Image (tube, rainbow, N blue to C red):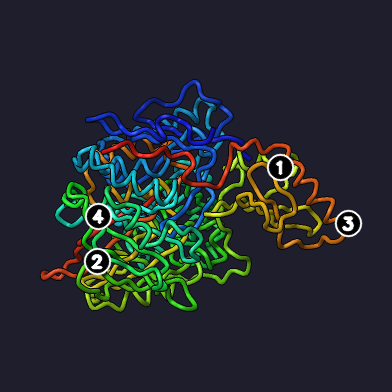
Amino acid sequence: MPGDSSDATALAPAGARTLRIPTAPADRYFDYCLQPYAPRCDPRGKLRGESLLWSSLDAAGVPVADDRPFRAVQRVAGRDMTVFGVKQQEGGAMSWELYFYDPDREDPRVTAANLRRELQGELEIVPEVADSIGYFMVSFELDAAALAARRVDEVDVYLPMYGFQGGVSYKFTATGRDLRNTYRFHDPRAELEAIVHQLERSVFVDMARTDLAAVLLPELLDCAKICVARKRFADAIYYSGLSVGQLLWFLRRFAYPAALVDFVEEQRGDLEHLRFDVGIDHRTGPDGRLVVPKTSYYSTL
Amino acid sequence: MIAAWRRLDPEAGSGEGCDPAAGVVVALHGETAARHDRAVGRPGAFARLAAAIADLRTAGRLPALACEVSIRADNLDALPRIVGVAKRLGAERCTFIAPVTDAAVMASLDATIPAVREALARSRELDIDGRIRHLPACLLGDDAEALEATCDASDPPAFACLFASRCALSERCAGLPTAYVHRFGWERNRLQPVLREAPWPREDGSPAAFAAWLALLGPAASRVTAVELDRLAARYRVDLGRGRSLVLELSPRTADRPALARSRTFDIRYTKATGLGGPALARVVEAIAAAIVARDDGSLDLDPRRVLPPLPPA
């Protein structure tokens, strides 16, 4: 039966975390916008993308007991239906963001209100988000402290643009909501000028002192989609549909923990069927050099 | 015409035991012994190279000689003279190879392209087959013919070009080494892409990656060109040949939604039928539906929660 592997469903024994989660015949493959894709090669006998989530938690020293909110989310949203992002701040602090897409409201369980309701007891999501808001996605971020406390104080809500793939996000808290980021997606094969146009016009990155190649990375240009984001304190670029080799390059380039990089390197052959997505925030520092305050990579849970 | 080539490394032996009919390829890094030795990092390397070539020729084991010349910032001015050395060694072919990973030895395209083209011109004067590797075709003018195609199979890519998807030269030109881009930039204003007419091929993945889902269709699986699994449906693009195609859609089984047929797990529908109609269409889709009904044993479904047991109590 699909997914009936004990590895795929069992909780890790106390003190140990199962990192290698095998594929199953019924697995679906989605990018970080929950757009389906065909695997790069036959996935039989290989690993699910969620293996990257568990390996990152392991590398960050998060207790196995704190996997529980992620497993609860997987049970509510369904296998493959949650995008996770592993984020690393400039100083090395790590966090995990979970993204829930259902723009057409195909699954009544994957709404902000229902997630809040169904996760109660496993994860207290403080802000309330009305499902009547025309969002196409909601997300929330967990760091080690939030995982230990089983508490989410902020929820991001994403509204779609009209006429092109893009969005604008708002941060919801218990007391209010703030405009946060804008996103615009491009086909790098057909819309290169639009990508470059946005990258070269920035209030955070001094492009007079920054070469385009520092923010539009040649190792990652061969990808399915590029998103350029405007954030409150940085600009960002996201590359979608990357190979495992490109992911490894990214992890090394941005100095992710050695244990995490080693895991991907060791499992490279069992991750080659997947496509990955990565994000990089940029701004110019006080000394005029390009700073990368945050990076992230994505797969599905 | 030489059918095979073998590489000769004089530092590692002179190649006895190799196919004597194979041509010999040697690396040549300078127009003087001193420059070659410096590039190789071994005093006397050029002398050993020349001696090994002479030995092979004397032994009748040198049917043809090809020289590979690395293009470096510190030998650009010497490239035409290196061709002269290659001629003296008896080379019939000279390949000028730009560095791919070592940014420290790279020169800008502004400096590299004229030097390499001058070396190619010198090769023609000396009746040597001049070739180029790892330079952008769009900057080589008539000499683009001399560019050997680069197939970049590395992961991550070792080459990139902002214009790859729109340039007609992309099939044989990989663009710029990524190490070059990091040192000298994307060369956006220097590259001269040739507008391509055919669309850039997309890597959409193979339907074979969905083996279990394909197997449901029986013989029609061989006609499937794409499979898409999203939240609520499995969709198969089926190419029936001669311009005839359709999209077959499986969604979770219902009791009452309109469907062509229902299997144990799925409602079966089709959409986007092209080049087919009437009884012919009915025959095709009914045959596929029957295959699915016969093969659907319930082991595949679209319920993402089915295989996940509840969490044990905290």
Q: What is the crowding at mark 4: few (fewer than 14 residues within 10 Å), some, or many (at least 20)?
A: some
Q: Which residue matches tag 1?
A: B292
**Residue A153 placement: quadrant:** bottom left
Q: What distance separates the C-alpha of mark 3 from that of mark 2?
A: 60 Å
Q: What is the crowding at mark 3: few (fewer than 14 residues within 10 Å), some, or many (at least 20)?
A: few
Q: Which residue matches tag 4?
A: A124
Q: What is the crowding at mark 1: few (fewer than 14 residues within 10 Å), some, or many (at least 20)?
A: many
Q: Nearer the viewer, mark 1 or mark 4?
A: 4
**Subunit of label 1:** B
Farthest residue in the top direction? B17
Q: How many marks?
A: 4
Residue B160 appears in the figure: no
Q: Vertical placement of B267 versus A108: above or below?
A: above
Looking at the rendered structure, the secondary structure element under dot 1 is: helix
**Subunit of label 4:** A
Residue B1 appears in the figure: yes
**Residue A181 placement: quadrant:** bottom left
Q: Which residue matches tag 3?
A: B279
Q: Is residue B21 left or right of residue B90?
A: right
Same subunit, tags 1 and 3: yes
x, y (%) of residue A41? 53, 42
Looking at the rendered structure, the secondary structure element under dot 2 is: strand
Instruction: Choose between A122 and A153: the one closer to the eye.
Output: A122
- First-in-chain label (4 vs 2): 4
Looking at the rendered structure, the secondary structure element under dot 3 is: helix
Q: Which residue matches tag 2?
A: A282
Instruction: Choose between B226 and B23: the one closer to the eye.
Output: B226
Same subunit, tags 3 and 2: no
Q: Amino acid at mark 3?
A: Pro
Q: Residue at x 48, y 64 (%)?
A: A105
